[in-house]
Amino acid sequence: MSETFRDMILIAKDALSKAGIKGAGNEAPLIAALAAGIDRDRIMISMADRVEREHLQRLDQLLLERGVRKPLSHILGYRDFFKHRFHVGPQVLDPRPETEILVMAALAEDFTRVLDLGTGSGAILISLLAERPQAFGVGTDLSETALSIARQNVQRLGVADRCELCPADWFAGVEGEFDLIVSNPPYIAADEMAGLAPELSFEPRMALTDEADGLTAYRAITMGAGDHLKPGGRLMVEIGPTQAKAVTRLYRESGLTEVSVLRDLDGRDRVVIGKLARSNG
């Protein structure tokens, strides 16, 4: 009997479940649609249609890749984040839903110039610029390959004329002052790396860990923020759920005021915010 799209989805769900992948039922239609070369919405309304042998062969290959825990986003070639679809791959950190807390916090403030340190795919910076048509942004990253992905996203999502991307080690070579500085830096301590989900082994290690205590980036960012923020400007960074105390201390030691911590939807500390005080002069 010939297989149908429904059969493809069932095959995929079974294989993903046996591989121990959570959310197998959600991933199965996406992988089946990719194997068949059609949109997911179309596969859902064509469940009884027969599929070609080549589609089943392609499905087998994709399931093998996912079975060794290659991230779904790397297989699909994209990740949906905030309001947009971003091209991703092994060159960049995969943007995650909890980082949207940082984007929403930033959009609650007024800004016309924004700096994104360690921009990666550009997901944070592009999301902010797309919501603020009058704003200009700068994104830096130490990785040229990451910047190549960011440039693709900047062009595809229509903010290239308001965005500058440049290779830099945090603030090195960055000129001017900004109303807002944002960053999702590598914050996983070296001794925590072994306990991470296997999918993370496919992402760039330098985007995950500082190979130390997880706080190296925050020291550099807070130390340099005062020279790059306009008076009254804000610094917002994503943190690991156990780092709020240490990072808020770094904020205060660097002279930032009105320091606060935002939690994500799971109730975990996720974003630290601070302000550069206005001069009394």
Image: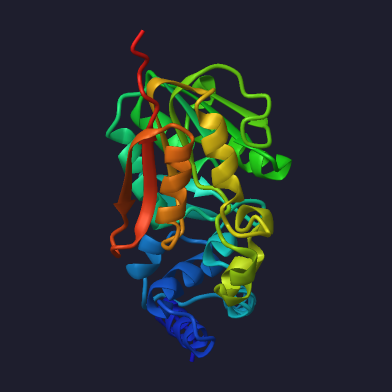
Colour basis: rainbow
Observer-nearest of 197 and 23: 197
The residue positioned 59% from the left and 67% from the top of the image is 200
Q: Is residue 166 above or below residue 42?
A: above
Give residue 204's position: percent from left, percent from top.
66, 57
Q: Is residue 223 above or below residue 241?
A: above
| 188 relative to 110 in the view: left or right | right
Identify which residue, 54 or 89, lies in the foreground. 89
Q: Does residue 273 appear left or right of residue 181 in this picture?
A: left
Decide if residue 194 is in sight here. Answer: yes
Residue 242: x %, y % from top left: 43, 63
Q: Position of residue 233 (x, y in %)?
A: 39, 25
Asked whether, in this view, residue 54 is left or right of residue 273, the answer is right
Determine which quarter of the picture holds residue 40.
bottom left
Q: Is residue 197 left or right of residue 25?
A: right
* Of residues 108 and 88, the one drawn nearer to the viewer in this rendering: 108
- Would you place residue 218 above or below residue 26 in this image? above
Which part of the image, by quadrant, shows the C terminus? top left
Observer able to see residue 118: no
* Location of residue 278 in the rendering, given as x and y in whole percent from the top left corner: 35, 18
Q: Nearer the viewer, residue 202 or 3?
A: 202
Q: Residue at x 45, y 75 (%)?
A: 28
Kindly identify the residue that appears in the image at 64 percent across and 65 percent down: 190
Residue lying furthest top = 281
